[in-house]
Amino acid sequence: MRSHTQYLWFNTVNKQEFINITMQVEEILKKSCIKEGLCLVNAMHITSSIFINDDESGLHKDFSLWLERLAPFGKDKYQHNLTGEGNADAHLKRTIMGREAVVAVTQGKLDFGPWEQIFYGEFDGQRRKRVLVKIIGE
Amino acid sequence: MRSHTQYLWFNTVNKQEFINITMQVEEILKKSCIKEGLCLVNAMHITSSIFINDDESGLHKDFSLWLERLAPFGKDKYQHNLTGEGNADAHLKRTIMGREAVVAVTQGKLDFGPWEQIFYGEFDGQRRKRVLVKIIGE
Amino acid sequence: MRSHTQYLWFNTVNKQEFINITMQVEEILKKSCIKEGLCLVNAMHITSSIFINDDESGLHKDFSLWLERLAPFGKDKYQHNLTGEGNADAHLKRTIMGREAVVAVTQGKLDFGPWEQIFYGEFDGQRRKRVLVKIIGE
């Protein structure tokens, strides 16, 4: 069994952003030389997400508005914010969108359907954060 | 390390359906001859889900009504639908239910608790879609 | 490839609880002697969760209140409860929080960001339930 580990760093301009990282993950996979296996991609911070969906800007706006409705921002709305933080909503938003994606590696490629793309979802940005890519297989 | 990859196709009668695929995944596992490892099952389309829960029809109706409340259908409700699509709600519903399940393989079996069953969740059906089953181990 | 499988049992005092199990998973990892690989942690019951987030009690109260708003308890609110069960809301809450976490193992450690902690989320407790930890790698 082989394994390959790499980290991606992000420091977003905005508090909330969705960034397509599919190509970066594909490059890491190529470097790993693994042909058959599993690729884990996960946010290493608890106010950001990795998720797989469509690269369509209208949909991303829908995601933002929807998450704001399900888990609205608000300094006074959450007990977590009594600790001095203001990002409780970001913890909830990331919970909806998910921490990680596990992707099959088949014949040296991410084994994706026609529209699957990997996104980094930032909900409390403007600071340096990491994503882990770990591939195991042969 | 061994690996085994197989695809399941679905073309649902209704726009929304939950289909128990546990037996199909078990058969694929048997064919793989893998005794210890991990089994990834994921939707390859971004308006459908794989999730693990109870095979109880009342609960499935509850899931449907609940998802409709959290992410209602509506041609005019979403920016994604300005692209000509009408399925933005299906992208959101699938996000709640999840893209994938990772299941342990122990002594040649899916290592499940008493009520765990794997479901394909379709939110924009009536067309051909795929699910990937990838097992790695020994 | 090596693999290691272990089960954790829980019987919570309250119907709903969040329990930090990071140290228990780290001990299982140490016992496995696996240095590079993947660690799957999943609830084996369909009204409980494994999720990764911050170990901060205010945030946990926020999670509880938020889940109650998204998927309120109510004997008469759900069709699943016509089967004699009263826990339909727990199935929905667990769906939001997730069934499983997959964690990278790097140099013999859970490859975590600064605040990542693994939690068992119980939504229908006061009875014995299991969590599975499966590690594969080398």
Image (cartoon, coloured by chain):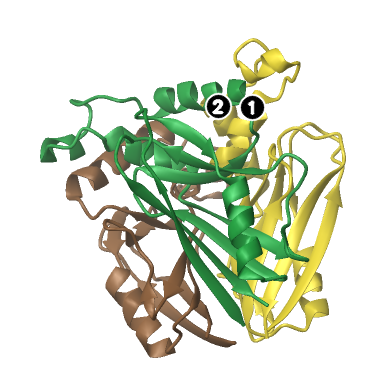
Chain colours: A green, B yellow, C brown
- Residue A127, placed above or below residue C5: above
User: Is B120 left, or right, of B102 in this rendering?
Assistant: right
Task: Tell which of B83 and C49 is nearer to you.
Answer: B83
Quadrant (top left/top right/bottom left/bottom right) for the N terminus of chain C? bottom right
Element type at mark 1: loop
Q: Is residue A19 visible?
A: yes
* Residue C11 x, y percent position in the rendering: 33, 69
Q: Are marks 2 and 1 in contact (CB under 8 Å)?
A: yes
Q: Residues within 10 Å of mark 2 (few under 14, many from 20)?
A: some
Q: Nearer the viewer, residue B130 or B112?
A: B130
* Badge number at residue C106: none
Q: On the rendered structure, is B63 left or right of C87?
A: right
- Is residue C63 depicted above or below B119 in this figure? above
Q: Total number of numbered labels? A: 2
Between C114 and C8, the residue placed more toward the observer is C114
Residue C116 lies, in percent from the top left, at 31, 58
Q: Quadrant of residue A106?
A: bottom right
- At label 1, the amino acid type is Glu
Residue C44 in view: no
Q: Residue at x 27, y 52 (%)?
A: C54
| Residue under numbered circle 2 | A60
Tell me the residue that label 1 is attached to: A56
Residue C124, picture quadrant? bottom left
Q: Is residue C17 above or below residue A37?
A: above
x and y, in percent, of residue A70 in the image: 42, 28
